[in-house]
Amino acid sequence: MSATLNRPRRTGHERRRTLSAALGWAACALALVLVIGPLLDIVYVVAARGLSAFSIGLFTTVTNGTGGGLLNAITGTIILSLGALVVAVPVGVGAGIYLSEYGTNRLGSGIRFLSDVLTGTPSIVLGYFSYIVFVTWLGWDFSVLAGSITLAILIVPYLARITELALRQVPNNMREAGFALGAREPTVVFKIVLPMAAPGVITGILLALAISVGETAPLIYTAGWSNYQWNGHLTNSPIGYLTYVIWSFINEPSDSAHALAFAAALIVMLVVLAINIGVRLVVRRKKPG
């Protein structure tokens, strides 16, 4: 009884703080539900309908109209994404090295500005630009080379900025130690700084790969579409890819087309998930201990 009497009474200010904290937590919970709810619904629908369409024939046969399998689209996605990395990685990583080690001048500022502008440019604008330049002007027609270069243009800014950030995290005393041992500047950059920043650079490459796998708009204008396997020609030969199946086949009236669309969406989702898991593993290895 005495403990109850001696308990201090909460002031009006404390009650208002408690109420505001409760309302804040409730708002956070509601926001979390609004974000996660649709995401889980999308994942469930894509997984349920995509898995029902999985079969051996899906991965071993090519598309036949709006039916068949996805072998041509899967191989086409791999070819386009790897082709984009072949073009983008040397340019993007090289630009990141320049911005980190030498980019304190006006040229570096200009490159950063243009990189930010290119990052904010809608991908369909890049696709239209590439259609005019590669498909029409150079006469490449719908092709692997036009699609890969367009994807490379799209992901180069991400590679450049992530590489720059990764290199800037390397302590300056490591550079000074290399110079103290008599190493020249290229040796310090490529033998000391770049290997130490390798996890960050690899993270940027994996994120760029995830972006290229999920793109549709630039490829519609540059890669076209083909129901057949790639014939090995870099130009004047369209190629299939998974995101086209998702974009186009879902609007078809047949159930077989819808099944292929959901199967392609599930494959893309699993690939992007695997890439993001790879990114986390690389970042975890980077952390000490």
Image (tube, rainbow, N blue to C red):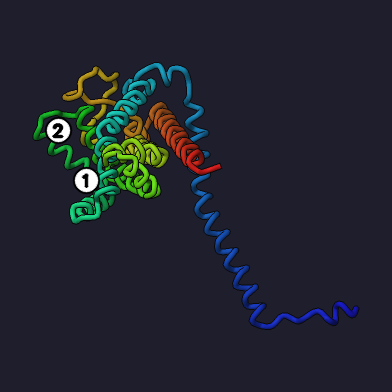
Side of 178 relative to 133 (left or right): right
Q: Residue at x 22, y 40 (%)?
A: 127
Furthest-right residue in view?
1
Q: Quadrant of the N terminus?
A: bottom right
Q: Secondary structure at mark 1?
A: helix
Q: Identify the mark at residue 161; answer none if there is no mark.
A: none
Residue at label 2? 135
| Amino acid tagged 2 | Val
Residue 129 image offset from top left, x and y in percent:
17, 42
Residue 80 image offset from top left, x and y in percent:
29, 29
Give the alpha-carbon distance from disc 1 to disc 2, as whole Å.
14 Å
Q: Secondary structure at mark 2?
A: helix
Residue at label 1? 125
Which of the two labelled residues, at mark 1 and mark 2, occupies the earlier sequence position? 1
Side of 195 relative to 121 (left or right): right
Looking at the picture, tell me which residue is in the foreground, 259 or 194: 194
Side of 5 relative to 219 (left or right): right
Residue 228 image offset from top left, x and y in percent:
28, 19
Residue 238 showing in the rendered view: yes
Residue 256 image offset from top left, x and y in percent:
41, 26
